[in-house]
Amino acid sequence: MPKPNLLILDDEISICKSLSFILEDDYEVYASTDPDEAIALFSHVAFSIALLDLRLGMRDGIDVLKQLRSVSPRTVVIIMTAYGSIPSAVEAMRQGAFYYASKPIDMHELKVLLEKAMEQFQLQSRVEWLSEEIQKAYDVHGLIGHSAQMQNVFSLIDKVKNIDSSVLIMGESGTGKELVARAIHFAGDRQKQVFSTINCAAIPANLIESELFGYEKGAFTGAVARKTGIFETANGGTLFLDEIGELDIGLQSKLLRVLQEKAIMRIGGQKEIAIDVRIIAATNRDLKKEIQQGKFREDLYYRLNVIPILLPPLRERQEDIPSLIQHFINKINERMSKQIKGIDPDALQLLLDYPFPGNVRELQNIIERSIALADGDRVTVSDLPGDLQTKPAQPADSKLVPVYVGETMETVERKVILSTLQAMDGNRRKTAETLGIGERTLRDKLARYRAE
């Protein structure tokens, strides 16, 4: 682990040298007698702690402290001051200094103070990290939409945020399943605890068990020390099991036992460890079909699927595309220091007509590429990828219903029924006759669609 960076600013070079020599084993020490030089260092060095003398020749140490706090508010500043300047040190603390050390410096006391300063720095970093995570959840970065489907998702997030029941998020790749999991966690009672994620498809089957449950020293060849699994590190918080459909069938029974007993046992361990973890799982597979094929345990499915959340593909909520585009423009402008104001109508129409097999993630990538290449202040057709710049020709009287690879039969049936009903101007009798089904069957299916 790299040593934390520490700045020493004192106008006496002898003090700079002696403190550097004593502290260099524990810190990456930078020393300076010039306040301007020291402040300039902050442009390329992230300092955890600064030791600042209040007497810097003609410069007022309080003013230098204010400058340091301005350029690096996270840096924890300890004031060094002569005994007679204690009132000035107290004033410095009012201006944001962490504490003060009286000269002549007692090195034992200073080292204790530095340890406490590092604890303060790490605490601040943790708070900032949590704030950023919460902002991510509410910034929703793709969880945007006025469509009925997305409003239903938002409603479910609000309902389940404070309960511990397992949630299963289903949807195609790129629809934002992890974003929903994060929103549930950071909107709820566990928001100040850990949010951990593991991709069941990204870790080889022979390694994922140790990642989940950990192992004891000597449990197998190469286990030279105890390893804590992700269930333990997530204790008190939320564990997001992404691509749960890819989990090895043998491990599924072990996961089921953990969910039932609320306890884990490390590989090679002799005792169970109680855990309190809220489980959110996600998949882009049809788990019911996987069950029929013997690839997924039915009992685990029902244990995970206490609260199902279905994320619609982007092609089924086209009305959300303009809002998503503007959201991505705003975010990417900030990151790239661009000034793109919006998208031309012709370019927008091409995107509205595109099926987005990669869903929201693909839309974000398209907008990012377009902004990077844009010459003006708007995204135009010429900024879009080449395969999107021309709209495929269709007969003027075409009444095609788009069907995509990987869609379930239920989804295809729903599209055909609703499109036919629209083509028949809402006439249910004609719709049923055209589709070759009874009016009662049609009525039941439409009622189910409204309930969903």
Image (cartoon, rainbow, N blue to C red):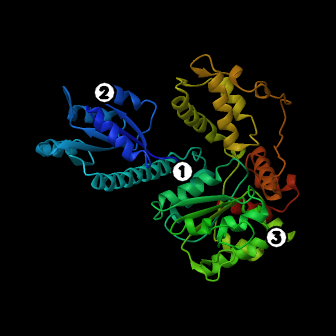
Look at mark 1 in the image and give the residue it sits on. Answer: 1
Numbered marks: total: 3
Q: Are marks 1 and 2 in contact (CB under 8 Å)?
A: no
* Whether residue 199 can be seen here: yes
Q: Amino acid at mark 2?
A: Asp
Residue found 62% across the figure and 58% down from its top: 197
Measure the alpha-carbon separation of dots 1 and 2: 30 Å
- At label 2, counting other C-alpha atoms closer than 10 Å, the crowd grade (few under 14, some 14-19, many 20 or more) is some
Q: Nearer the viewer, residue 329 or 245?
A: 245
The answer to which quarter of the image holds residue 257 is bottom right
Tell me residue 162's x, y (percent). 49, 66
Residue found 14% across the figure and 41% down from its top: 88
Q: Nearer the viewer, residue 346 or 125?
A: 125
Q: Secondary structure at mark 3?
A: helix
Look at mark 3 in the image and give the residue it sits on. Answer: 291
Measure the alpha-carbon separation of dots 1 and 3: 45 Å
Q: Please say if 23 is above or below 260.
A: above
* Whether residue 69 can be seen here: no
Q: Are marks 1 and 3 in contact (CB under 8 Å)?
A: no
Q: Amino acid at mark 1?
A: Met
Look at mark 2 in the image and give the residue it sits on. Answer: 34
Q: Secondary structure at mark 1?
A: loop
